[in-house]
Image: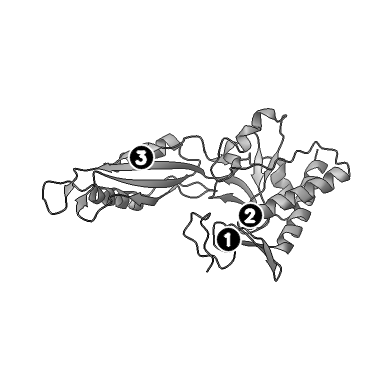
Amino acid sequence: MFTSRYCKTELFYTRDPFSPTIQKGKLFGLGSNDAGGPLVALIGAFVHLVQIHSPCNLILAAVAEEEISGAGGVVSILERLPCIELAIVGEPTQMEMAIAEKGLVVIDGVAKGVPGHAAHENTINPIVQACADIQAIHTHHFDRLSPFLGKTKASVTVIHAGEQHNQVPAECHFVIDVRVNEMYSLEEVVEIIQNKVQSQLTPRSLRLKPSGIDPDHKIIQVANDLKIPVFGSSTLSDQALFPFPSIKIGPGDSLRSHTSDEFIYLKEIDEGMEKYIQLIEAYFKTK
């Protein structure tokens, strides 16, 4: 088993994730599938189209901080871009086209109690309250279904309280990850969950809203002509920050993302580059 002090996730690696290796047609390495493979395929398509003097104005942006939607990522260049007719976001979708994706709101929850010695009766245990609230969140069903993005889903993904076995803590902290369809605003989702629990909830951000392209946009007809399946994505990307139309498509499989021994097939990258070229050329033939 390979372990690394640079890996903060609880994953068990059998190879060094920071040393890319190729074995039986697979490229192994952290970020190879999400989203190094799509980035390489986009770069290859860009170089090819520029070399043949494509009639369109192509812009390639290789940006960081996508996983955290950080200030040093795509938002750092948006004001410097010209008018964008259509953007392609490179993510592992098995070269199927995501034309909508759920929004995301991360919520910090705090259950407050009365601290004291575990042997005494004059305490209020915030862990007990947090457990009741987490159960309420787990069993709550958002009833507005999206025809394309399905249901809004809330998941408690982090919990922390206490330091010693004999002390009831003052607070219990937990984190809620909510994937939101277009039937709800992020503010509304926070309010709904707050009304279900006693813990105090604070959203970290309300800017990662659901996104989607106009169903009449011509890129969808191009996808149909090329027999590229379209779908609504439950995972977030830089699309949430774009003020212009965009689609999400790329080589690789989303199920491999954030897993130990992450990999992408070399043939997936090659095929992805070819399909990017086909897609862009077909799109500009419609102009």
The numbered mark, 1 or 2, whose residue comes first in the sequence reads 2
Q: Nearer the viewer, mark 1 or mark 3?
A: 1
Q: Residue furthest front?
A: 5
Tell me whether circle 1 and circle 2 mark residues in contact (CB < 8 Å): yes
The residue where tag 2 is placed is 92
The residue where tag 3 is placed is 192
Position of 13 relative to 245 (above/below): below
| SS of the residue under disc 1 | helix
Instruction: Judge from the rendering whether residue 48 lies leftward or rightward of residue 79; answer left or right.
Output: right
The numbered mark, 1 or 3, whose residue comes first in the sequence reads 3
| SS of the residue under disc 3 | helix
The part of the image, by quadrant, that contains residue 86 is top right
* Residue 19 x/y as whole percent: 64, 60
| SS of the residue under disc 2 | loop
Instruction: Judge from the rendering whether residue 46 lies leftward or rightward of residue 38; answer left or right.
Output: right
Disc on res. 248: none
For the residue marked with disc 2, what is the amino acid? Pro
Res 109 visible: yes
Residue 111 or residue 94, whichever sits in front: 111
Task: State the CA–CA distance, disc 3 to disc 2.
Answer: 32 Å
The residue where tag 1 is placed is 256
For the residue marked with disc 1, what is the amino acid? Arg
* Residue 73 x/y as whole percent: 61, 38
Task: State the CA–CA distance, disc 1 to disc 3.
Answer: 33 Å
Check the picture and name the quadrant holding the C terminus.
top right
For the residue marked with disc 3, what is the amino acid? Ile
The numbered mark, 3 or 2, whose residue comes first in the sequence reads 2
Identified at 57% across, 49% down, the residue is: 232
Q: Residues within 10 Å of mark 1 (few under 14, many from 20)?
A: some
Q: Residue furthest bottom?
A: 24
Res 279 visible: no
* Residue 235 x/y as whole percent: 54, 49
